């Protein structure tokens, strides 16, 4: 659906009955386009070793308080095997950005291992940061189908304020990585953080237009949450209360559903960190994917991107027990054993 930048700004500022109507319209569009179905992806956080230093992130290289871990290949494959047996049709492998050759070939072996254990039927999504076209190609050839790489913000100016200016955190490089992924044949997902310091409503409208311009297949976006051990939190000045970042995220989701009715949009964990029912509320704004955390406990306690991240040390539980049944009770179909490719991708690659 065509929406002008002014209409997006208006929607982003909607409150009360107008806001309710915006979310309801997004749900109607989702149900009519991709169906009233929720795809589950098991999320495995391979490692929190990271070479980047993003000023907002709890696992940035410069955070000496973060306890580092890396799961063994056997642990990961055992976990994936269990997910496959439980009916999960797809898995997401996420980690900090580790450019070591050992990590690169480890991921390649894992992806081949997953193809082997599922007869090539399990969807494999990678979320491992900015890498060379050559690395993306190796992982694609090993059998990975999808890649998530958030642009974080479509504004190069704002990006510059959220990352060190050390030549290793360049907005243009990130954009180029997204193009490389698309050329390599991945289903491509991106996303942004919402409610960042220095972020204006106009930046968020531009984020939505950016995603449509890039013709993405998938999106995961959620509220920014200050992590106390990061420079951005120390600098202070997050503009909005958490509850408002939460509502604004729902309006972003609803507007993106209107702009791109046939993509997959995930209900992200950061929403759940603010509101225990955040993911369910995001379904009522137009999402159609959930990524329950399946990282074995030893790892997940330390994959702490922001405080109160469900499953990390000191946070509340994840509420993933009986999730399919609860979703069905809300009227959603939860397809089992299906990779769940985005309709948008199937359309753009149809002969
Ligand atoms: N608050 C919210 N999201 C965050 N991320 C990293 N740090 C934070 C934070 N403090 C998100 C980034 C990254 C994803 C893996 O986690 O958008 O791409």
Image (cartoon, rainbow, N blue to C red):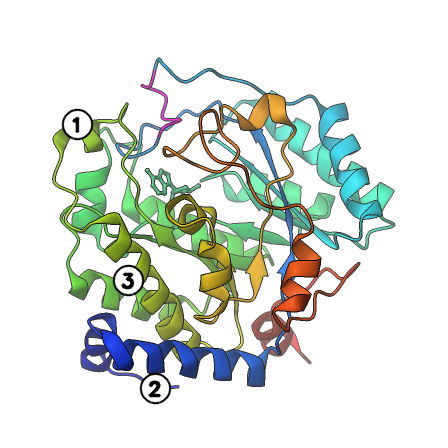
Q: CA distance from mark 1 to mark 3?
A: 23 Å
Image position of 274 with respect to 283: above or below = above
Mark 3 — residue?
A: 248
Label 1: element kind: helix
Callouts 3 and 2 close, C-beta under 8 Å? no
**Pointer 3 local density, CA inside 10 Å: few below 14, some 14–19, many at least 20:** many
Mark 1 — residue?
A: 234
> Where's residue 261, x and y in %?
48, 78
- Range of residues picked out in magenta: 58-63
Query: Ligand 1 sits in which quadrant?
Result: top left
Q: CA distance from mark 3 to mark 2?
A: 21 Å
| Mark 2 C-beta to ligand 1 under 8 Å | no
Number of marks:
3
Label 2: element kind: loop
Image position of 185 with respect to 61: above or below = below
Mark 2 — residue?
A: 2
Magenta-drawn stretch, dominant element (helix, strand or loop): loop
| Residue ID at (87%, 50%) | 119
> Where's residue 278, x and y in %?
44, 55
Sequence-first tag of 3 and 2: 2
Sequence-first tag of 2 and 1: 2
| 274 or 87, nearer to the observer | 274
**Pointer 2 local density, CA inside 10 Å: few below 14, some 14–19, many at least 20:** few
Q: Nearer the viewer, mark 2 or mark 1?
A: 1
Q: Nearer the viewer, mark 3 or mark 2?
A: 3
**Pointer 1 local density, CA inside 10 Å: few below 14, some 14–19, many at least 20:** few
Q: CA distance from mark 2 to mark 1?
A: 40 Å
| Residue ID at (12%, 40%) | 237
């Amino acid at each position: 659906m065509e929406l002008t930048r002014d209409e997006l700004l208006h929607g982003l500022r909607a409150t009360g009955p107008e806001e309710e109507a915006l979310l309801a319209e997004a749900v109607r569009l989702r149900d009519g386009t991709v169906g009233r179905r929720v795809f589950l992806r098991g999320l495995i956080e391979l490692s929190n070793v990271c070479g980047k230093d993003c000023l907002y992130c709890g696992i940035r290289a410069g955070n000496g308080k973060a306890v580092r871990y890396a799961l063994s290949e056997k642990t990961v494959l055992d976990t994936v095997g269990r997910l496959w047996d439980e009916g999960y049709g797809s898995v997401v492998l996420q980690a900090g950005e580790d450019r070591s050759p050992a990590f690169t070939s480890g991921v390649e072996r894992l992806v081949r291992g997953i193809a082997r254990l599922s007869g090539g039927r399990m969807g494999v999504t990678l979320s491992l940061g900015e890498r060379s076209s050559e690395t993306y190609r190796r992982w694609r050839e090993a059998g990975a189908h999808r890649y998530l790489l958030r642009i974080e913000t479509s504004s190069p100016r704002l990006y510059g304020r959220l990352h060190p200016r050390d030549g290793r955190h360049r907005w243009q490089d990130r954009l180029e990585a997204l193009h490389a992924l698309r050329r390599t044949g991945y289903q491509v997902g991106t996303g942004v953080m919402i409610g960042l310091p220095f972020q204006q409503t106009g930046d968020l409208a531009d984020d939505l237009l950016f995603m449509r311009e890039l013709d993405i297949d998938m999106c995961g976006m959620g509220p920014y949450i200050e992590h106390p051990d990061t420079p951005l939190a120390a600098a202070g000045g997050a503009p909005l209360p958490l509850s408002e970042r939460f509502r604004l995220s729902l309006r972003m989701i609803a507007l993106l559903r209107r702009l791109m009715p046939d993509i997959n949009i995930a209900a992200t964990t950061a929403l759940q960190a603010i509101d225990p029912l955040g993911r369910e509320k995001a379904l009522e704004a137009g999402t159609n994917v959930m990524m329950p955390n399946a990282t074995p406990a030893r790892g997940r306690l330390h994959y702490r991107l922001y405080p109160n991240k469900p499953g990390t040390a000191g946070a509340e539980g994840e509420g993933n027990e009986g999730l399919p049944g609860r979703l069905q009770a809300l009227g959603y179909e939860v397809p089992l054993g299906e990779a769940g490719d985005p309709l948008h991708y199937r359309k753009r690659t149809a002969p």
